[in-house]
Amino acid sequence: MTRYRMIATALALAVSAGAPAQQKSAADGIAEYRKMLEDGNPAELFEAKGENLWKTPRGPKNVSLQRCDLGLGAGIVKGAWVQMPRWFADTGRVQDLESRLLTCMETLQGFKADEIAKTGFDRGEQATLAALAAWISSESRGQKMALPQGHAEERRFYELGKRAFFFRGGPMDFSCASCHAEDKLRIRMQDLPNLTKNPGNGIGFAAWPAYRVSSGEMWSMQRRLNDCYRQQRFPFPGFASDVTIALGVYMGVNAQGAESIAPALKR
């Protein structure tokens, strides 16, 4: 039996088992399905790859990323993920994890950040970014989201992210808020967290990056946002553009105090 058939069987059993007696909800079934699979989360493979990529000299300069400053000092990884996006004085920008990694890959290793940003997801150095994000986020697993708001630009990006979250447009007249601004909304069998407030531990922003079982790929937050725009029938945002970073600030600050479980397992 292939892995995907095993996963499909596990999901079917999780949803259906005991339903007549306990009237188990679809959400309960999916939660059990994830519990069955979490010990073998394929994200662990990406974590291992990401750690190796962090430590291995690469790029035109043949240098590792071990001097990359993710906000807590050069080379400090633990605790960095739960405090991003944040302001960085050396770039004069608020940056999320992926945009900060682009900066380090360019300045330390000699890669061209704009070329990587234009590369399709899961290809070339974009695959490198996904693996790095998996490992770096795993180093903060179990810690509480604590995005800083001390700098004026961090606060400005929160307000920009809020405006982007509620902005409606496109052929469907959708916004992020169409799916994620109310409690107890669901699409098909998928519960939709209310991201205008703290949705709870390991939910929403505190669960990404994540391994997507349906596609067999590791998705960073940048890719998750890109797909949200696709579902709204909006033009795709530029990779690591200000609007995507601002949305990360808005959701991350709203998730203050939530426990990170990234990289999580998603359907």
Image: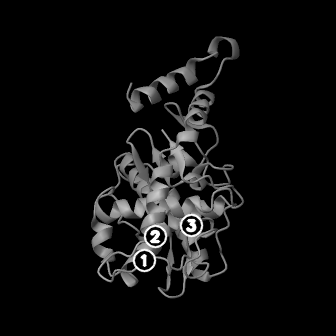
Mark 1 touches mark 2? (CB < 8 Å): yes
Q: Residue 148's image quarter?
A: bottom right
Q: Residue at x 46, y 51 (%)?
A: 45
Q: Nearer the viewer, residue 177 or 255?
A: 255
Question: Compared to 58, does 191 lie above or below?
Answer: above
Give the residue type at disc 2.
Trp
Q: Report x, y in % for residue 109.
A: 36, 80
Q: Residue 223's image quarter?
A: bottom left
Give the residue type at disc 1.
Ser
Q: Secondary structure at mark 3?
A: helix
Q: What's the CA distance linking mark 3 and mark 1? A: 28 Å
Q: Earlier in the sequence, mark 1 or mark 2?
A: 2
- Residue 191 visible from this viewpoint: no
Q: Nearer the viewer, residue 238 or 220?
A: 220
Mark 3 touches mark 2? (CB < 8 Å): no
**How many labels were placed on the picture?**
3
In the figure, is residue 164 to the left or right of 254? left
Q: Report x, y in % for residue 24.
A: 65, 21
Residue 249's disc is 3
Q: Secondary structure at mark 1?
A: loop
Q: Report x, y in % for residue 149.
A: 65, 75
Give the residue type at disc 3.
Val
In the displayed orientation, state which residue is furthest to the right.
Answer: 257
Q: What's the CA distance linking mark 1 and mark 2? A: 6 Å
Q: Earlier in the sequence, mark 3 or mark 2?
A: 2
Question: Compared to 88, does 15 lie above or below?
Answer: above
The quarter of the picture where the N terminus appears is: top left
Residue holding disc 1:
64
Q: Nearer the viewer, residue 113 or 194?
A: 113
Q: Residue at x 63, y 82 (%)?
A: 151
